[in-house]
Image (tube, rainbow, N blue to C red):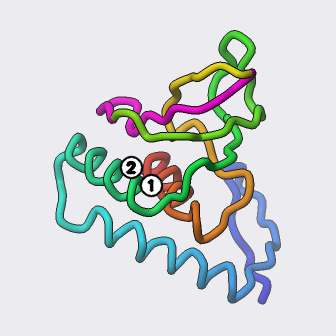
Amino acid sequence: MKKKIQTEDNNKVEKEITDSNLTNLEEQEKRIESVISECEDNFELIEIWLEYLENNVELPCKVIYNGYSRDELKSGTEIILNDFVDSEEHYGVIGAGKFNRQTINFPLCEVEPVTITPKNQALYDYVVWFTNR
């Protein structure tokens, strides 16, 4: 099915939207809602996400860093996520990983899985939620 959508610059563009894309978005919304449904406090939400990620993401997991460049770590760099180490209200869940044989900590909101699989879908759901909260 093709649907006309309005872009930010008010130009009309045709975009193909497949049933599977819509289904995937609906499924993702349901997964996210199941995690956050009974919580209203932002920090408590981050703690709930931390527990959810610990129980639903198979580690280690290859991720792409999409945050601001710092030292040698540039946007687009692949990192091996090895652990979930902390949660912080402003940055959300903090992960630990390997980059250039060094252990680094980084906010999970700044990464996304290299390939989305059932073993890391929860991580991608978290990133989508955090970005849109």
Residue under pointer 2: 133
Choose between 6 and 70: the one closer to the eye.
Answer: 70
Report whether 82 appears left or right of 14. left
Q: Residue 38's spot in the image, x, y percent? A: 18, 65
The residue depicted at 23 percent of the width and 40 percent of the height is 43
Q: Residue 77's spot in the image, x, y percent? A: 76, 32
Q: Secondary structure at mark 1?
A: helix
> Mark 1, mark 2: which one is toward the viewer?
1
Magenta region: which residues? Answer: 87-100
Q: Secondary structure at mark 2?
A: loop
Magenta stretch, main secondary structure class: strand
Amino acid type, label 1 = Trp
Disc marking residue 13: none
The residue depicted at 18 percent of the width and 58 percent of the height is 39
Residue under pointer 1: 129
Report crowding for label 1: few under 14, some 14 to 19, many 20 or more residues within 10 A (C-alpha): some
Report crowding for label 2: few under 14, some 14 to 19, many 20 or more residues within 10 A (C-alpha): few
Question: Between marks 1 and 2, how big is the CA–CA gap?
Answer: 6 Å
The residue depicted at 74 percent of the width and 80 percent of the height is 17
